Amino acid sequence: MNTAATLPPNSAGFILVLNCGSSSIKFALFDAAPAALPRQAEWKGKVEGIGGAKPSHVESGAASAPLALDAAQPYHSALMHIRERVAVHLGARRLCAVAHRVVHGGSKYSAPTRIDAEVLADLKNYIPLAPLHQPFALEAIEVLLASQPGLLQVACFDTAFHHTLPQVEQMLPLPYTLWERGLRRYGFHGLSYEYMSVVLEERFGAASHGRVIAAHLGSGASLCAMKALRSVGTTMGFSALDGLMMGTRCGALDPGAVLYLMEIEKLSLEQVAHLLYHESGLLGVSGVSPDPPALFAQERRQDAIGDQVRAALDLYVRRIVREIGALAAVLGGLDLLAFTAGIGEHSAEVRSRVCRDLAFLGVRLDQDANQCNSPLISSADSQVAVAVEPTNEEWIAARHALAILRS
């Protein structure tokens, strides 16, 4: 192996955070030397389009550039490229740990965990529950375990934050024997919600300990209801398909529709899975795009495409409003609504439409503040504070790795 790809291990130095998806890998380096871990990464970047025709790479302060990957092993090739770039950036400085965002920890893993071969083998059992992310995070872990077994690796689970869900929120209305075998609602986006629990307390103090709903709206999307900054309800369940309508995922769906697709439409299991994960949601209904801003640009068309786009956006907003209403009922009211992730942070139009339909809860927006993506977008007469807060999953993962490193 190219020595430039070998990461200097295990002394006080830097923590590398890896967030591996099916077609992209995000990475960030945090300086672990200060007593308080810096909130922002010293250096970060991502590789996108892995497995596609035009993969690209971008780093802090640089423009996106094309990237040549091994066509036979594009994901492994992308990982090697990142390792080489990290090694170049570090120079003589040391890497003390790697923190991985791992989507699914099942009912067993409720806290960040030091990874060894046994833990890695165990986590492979959860691949069917998170096929878009789990296998790729585990591939990165496996590569590093094989090449640098002495380097501390920590798995930070997106399901862990939701281990505080009461049993009534975890259970599915299926035979109890399936509950005993682990078929339950787990919840996801936990690293994002954990960051919300930190930053909302910093900004709102005691009010953040009340009835809070955080809306993680990105290509994947979910809501989390919190009391005392702990998860008490969420929209994603057994899998990351549940809950809100997403970019390409369906969200909550009558299981009878799946039976119909297989029995009457004669779709195979693999075809149904592909449809639900990749061809549904905003993309499927609109037939145009999975991205709300792109759809807003098309909704004024007075033709069949415009009709589909308007239907997709109406459904998207309705599902968010409906689920916020349901979680507000679980909470017994609502004190604070926080939008985060790509769409939640940057789409004033999505926030405006959602909050318009939440007027019954006393939600009122300051439209000027909303257009500017201000940290507080509710008006003075709103009964509910409405916030916009960028998420920071990388910092949460790095903080967990640092805690294990120092323990």
Image (cartoon, grey):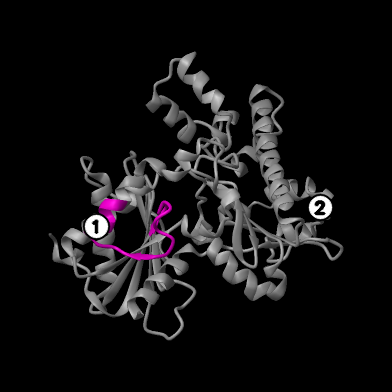
Circle 2: element type: helix
The numbered mark, 2 or 1, whose residue comes first in the sequence reads: 1
Residue occupying the point 20% across, 40% down: 72
Which mark's residue is nearer the viewer, 2 or 1? 1
Q: Quadrant of the C terminus?
A: bottom left
Choose top left, top right, bottom left or bottom right for residue 89.
bottom left
Does residue 112 appear to the left or right of 343 in the view shown? Answer: left
Residue 80 seen in this snapshot: no
Does residue 118 appear to the left or right of 404 in the view shown? Answer: left
Residue occupying the point 56% across, 47% down: 221
**Relative to 4, residue 254 above or below:** above
Q: Position of residue 66 (x, y in %)?
A: 33, 50
Give the labeled residue for mark 2.
361
Q: Residue furthest top?
A: 264
Residue 404 seen in this snapshot: yes
Range shown magenta: 101-122
Indicate the amino acid at tag 2: Leu
Indicate the amino acid at tag 1: Glu
**Is 58 or 248 nearer to us in this picture?**
248
Q: Position of residue 180 (x, y in %)?
A: 44, 45
Does residue 109 appear to the left or right of 285 in the view shown? Answer: left
Q: Position of residue 322 (x, y in %)?
A: 71, 42
**Relative to 206, residue 370 above or below:** above
Residue occupying the point 56% across, 42% down: 291
- Magenta stretch: includes residue 100: no
Q: Position of residue 305 (x, y in %)?
A: 63, 25
Q: Residue furthest bottom?
A: 35
Choose top left, top right, bottom left or bottom right for residue 378.
bottom right
Separation (CA) of disc 2 from disc 1: 49 Å
Residue occupying the point 56% across, 53% down: 342
Give the labeled residue for mark 1.
118
